[in-house]
Amino acid sequence: MNPDRLLDRVDPDRLLDRVDPDRLLSRVDFDAVAERVDVNAVMERVDVNSLVSRTELGEVIARSTTGVFGQLLDAARIAVMALDLTLHGLAARVLRRDDPTAQFGPGQVHETQTWRLPPQDRAVALQGRYAGAVSRFLAFLLDVTLTGALFGLIGTLLVSALQIVADVTWEAADHRLLVAVAYAVWQFVYFAGLTAIAGRTIGKAVLGVSVVRPDGTRVTARAAVMRTLAFPLSFLLFGAGFFLGVIRRDRRELHDLIGGTAVVYAWDAETARLRSGSSPAGST
């Protein structure tokens, strides 16, 4: 028998005309078919990240979850990160290091030439790397401004309540030592408390940096307390403790060394890249 000659004599059109799709489908037991499908096994074989990357789903989600403020914050963080790289790159060149573009992180191999990447890709690549002095300084200024405003507001409310309830007039100028002690305690509670609980203060959260242990793990309460207590020492000798963070590869300042901590970039740069509508470098 010649199969080729047999197939040549088959008329596919006539064959399909004789097929009754309704009768064929009525004989299929879809419940039995569904029971034989291992849904978990199918889902395990689906590369969700690859699927999302080939669609605009990630960008749609990112754009829908935040608005103009989120995009402005992303742009500010990326701009400050660029200033960090510029400052520490200059310091590395002055110190004549082998690779002034090297960026280090806790327990990670350093990456070079991140400055060649587009801003959004560079932000993603630097997550988990040691944060620069500009980001840290701006976070500190924001925290000091915020804590000062809150302290003044709470103090005003307490003085007003004391005057209304007890009919007592209390002047801060007559109790400067008490006010100074209260302010110091307030600052300690704010910095040590938030660092121990969340690994970052409000200022650090805005700038996208976080406090960790030298190996990159979560900071402990003891380390947060020691770091906060040692912080004033960094102001001594005209801020020499802060200058250490500019010249050291790990960018740790004096209070980091005493407290056993480090500061790293830690914000959702990948979502920021999706919000900007850009694709990862090298993708098509």
Image (cartoon, rainbow, N blue to C red):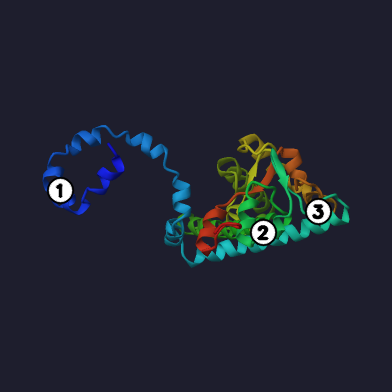
CA gap, disc 3 and disc 1: 71 Å
- Label 2 is placed on what type of residue? Leu
Q: Nearer the viewer, residue 25 or 217?
A: 25
Determine which residue is flagged by label 3. 100
Q: Position of residue 25 (x, y in %)?
A: 15, 44
* Any part of residue 171 in sight: no
Q: Quadrant of the C terminus?
A: bottom right
Check disc 1 and report its element: helix, strand or loop: helix
Camera-side residue of 92 and 236: 92
How many numbered circles does the render carry? 3
Which residue is at a point 78% across and 56% down the rendered structure image? 88
Position in image of residue 268 (x %, y %): 55, 52
Q: Which residue does the numbered mark 1 point to in the structure image?
A: 21
Element under label 2?
A: loop
Q: Are marks 3 and 2 in contact (CB under 8 Å)?
A: no
Residue appearing at x 78%, y 47% in the figure: 249
- Distance from disc 1 to disc 2, alpha carbons, whole Å, reads 57 Å
**Residue 222 appears in the rendering:** yes
